[in-house]
Amino acid sequence: MRSRFCIFALALLMVVPAFAQTAPLSRDVVREKLRASLAKYGLLDDVNTTFRQSEKQPYNFVGSMKAGLKNAESLEVVISVTTHDTIGIRVYPHYNGGYINLNKARNSGGLMRKLLQYSDTNFLYWGADDTFDVFCGYTFTLESGYPEDAMKIVLRSIHNTDQYVGEVREFIDAE
């Protein structure tokens, strides 16, 4: 009798987590939750950004951070609800009239090495897109639902990108 109870209890422990998993949110639901988060957290003093839905990409929101920056002219923020149950955030620093571009940098090898180090030590990872424009980013997986609290933390940390723009100037600027 005791062994039957143990087998039943073990089987129950294996089945319960399967029922506890939440169903994935639809892309439209995630977009609306993201819209609400951006409206709320965009008002915070350390975010201070108005986000708008992209006209070209209905699952993208864009905003520009300008206040309080010492090195970058602005930080262009692009947030995408992907088809792969993720939310991707990319922050493009604007410096000296445009994007920081690996092909236009004075020392692109040095810039790439520095960005790679930043990816190891920074909260946000660093990369370059298919046109070689430099960005920092963060990716949320939606496996556990919409990441409301984490979204606030990431949005509040974007402003710190300005510091790193100052540190890579030596690789960008002409001599």
Image (cartoon, helix red, strand yellow):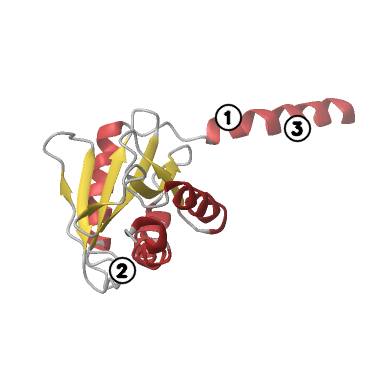
Q: Residues within 10 Å of mark 2 (few under 14, many from 20)?
A: some
Identify whether 19 is placed above or below 63.
Answer: above
In the displayed structure image, the side of residue 36 where residue 141 appears, left or right? right
Q: Which residue is mark 1?
A: 18
Residue closest to the far front = 175
Looking at the rendered structure, the secondary structure element under dot 2 is loop
In the displayed structure image, the side of residue 163 where residue 60 appears, left or right? left
Whole-Å distance between the Cαs marked 3 and 1? 15 Å
Hey, what amino acid is under mark 3? Ala
Q: Which of the image's four quarters has the N terminus?
A: top right
Mark 3 near mark 2, Cβ–Cβ under 8 Å? no
| Residue 1 in view in this figure | no
Percent from the top left, x then y, of residue 103? 34, 42
Residue at image position (20%, 48%) is 62
Mark 3 near mark 1, Cβ–Cβ under 8 Å? no
Q: Earlier in the sequence, mark 2 or mark 1?
A: 1
Image quarter of residue 87: top left
Residue at image position (20%, 54%) is 63
Residue at image position (88%, 27%) is 3
Q: Which residue is mark 3?
A: 9
**Nearer to me, 110 or 84:** 110
Whole-Å distance between the Cαs marked 3 and 2? 60 Å
Looking at the rendered structure, the secondary structure element under dot 1 is helix
Q: Which residue is mark 2?
A: 71
Percent from the top left, x then y, of residue 106? 37, 52
Whole-Å distance between the Cαs marked 2 and 1? 49 Å
Hey, what amino acid is under mark 1? Ala
**Nearer to me, 77 or 86:** 77
